[in-house]
Image (cartoon, rainbow, N blue to C red):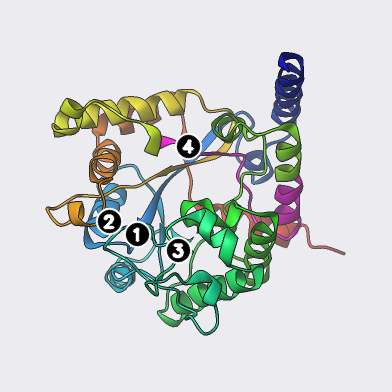
Amino acid sequence: MKCIVSLFLLALQVQILTAQNSPTFAEKLGYPKGAKIIILHIDDMGMSYDSNLGGIEAMTKGVANSCSVMMPCPWVPGFVHYMKEHPGLDAGLHLTLTSEWKDYRWGSLSGKPQTPGLTDAEGAMWRGVADVVRHASADEVETEIRAQVDRAKTMGFEPTHLDSHMGTLFATPAFIERYIKVGIEYQIPVMFPGGHNTLIAQELKNTSADMQMARVIGKKLWDAGLPVLDDLYNDSYSWKPTPDIYANDKKLQAYKTGKYMDVLKSLQPGITMIIMHCTNTTEVFEHISDSGPTRRGDYLAMIDPALKKFIEKEGIVLTTWREMKERRDKIKTQNPKP
């Protein structure tokens, strides 16, 4: 058994090294060879007032520079109105197929008659990814994705990219296929790590077969005229400091800033999206979720001047989905298909 595991690990290392020796998607977009390019991305905009407040402050007063919106949630209008008053924010759709909290819930935009497989006994979306996989068809998933894109466009919100709340759209090959399909059809960039995938492979313990499939999908997106990530970091939710750190904003900020610095030090060249959940928690948020301290830590890290100085010192370049799409479109214009 140990021999088999060792072979898998060796194969994975070979896959990563091969990808690292190939041109990165960052290079293809015109960034310098060897450059470390990052998107500091905030999930869950529109989920609550506190989420909007923290996300906006992390982007306007801190170093975070991108976000995505949960279209079925009640505070979406508040964030979209803010965007219209402050144009230029990099905001995509956090495609939402689950409603995970106990008392604070939302339903599908497509509605139960169209997508009964996305609806639980309370009339909301299922709480967990496994329940969505168990009950919903790929057709229902696509219907709901389209409904969320349609609501954004109806509100005058043109999303810069698509991504997936709780990773539900990565749960099955059929869901991934519909996610990619809609992005290509609308020509909206899709969050998908299709490059060397160093950090995400470590996090998810991907096999070489998984890595190869990811690169095939990455090539498909690139060939369809969309930008592609080289890597993804999505593990900050697992950072668990001691209770005394959670209870003190200064300690929490120092802890989270240090953790993000460690991630940034580990980056390989290419475009890496780093996911976080910035929330400026009020007394209300504890009635939504017990994740408030974790989310508050992300918010405090993003507004920490020490993190900004570190990024500048390391020579790390910030980019956005909007900029990546502009670069990809320029390449298409310069090299049109025959």
Label 1 sits on residue: 45
* N-terminal-most mark, 4 or 1: 1
* N-terminal-most mark, 1 or 2: 1
**Which mark identifies residue 317?**
4
- How far apart marks 4 and 1 lie (CA) works out to 24 Å
Task: State the extent of the magenta-drawn residues as a range.
Answer: 216-236
- How far apart marks 1 and 2 lie (CA) works out to 6 Å
Label 3 sits on residue: 126
Residue 325 in percent (x, y) is at 58, 57
Label 2 sits on residue: 51
Q: Is residue 232 magenta?
A: yes
What is the secondary structure assignment of the residue under circle 4?
Answer: strand
Instruction: Please identify, in this view, whether the residue under mark 2 or under mark 4 is nearer the observer.
Output: 2
Q: Which residue is found at the position 47% from the left and 52% from the top?
A: 166
Which is nearer the eye, 182 or 108?
108
Q: Quadrant of residue 151?
A: bottom left
Residue 177 in percent (x, y) is at 69, 60
- Three-letter code, disc 1: Met
Answer yes or no: do the residues labelled 1 and 3 have beta carbons within 8 Å? no
* N-terminal-most mark, 3 or 4: 3
Answer yes or no: do the residues labelled 1 and 2 have beta carbons within 8 Å? yes
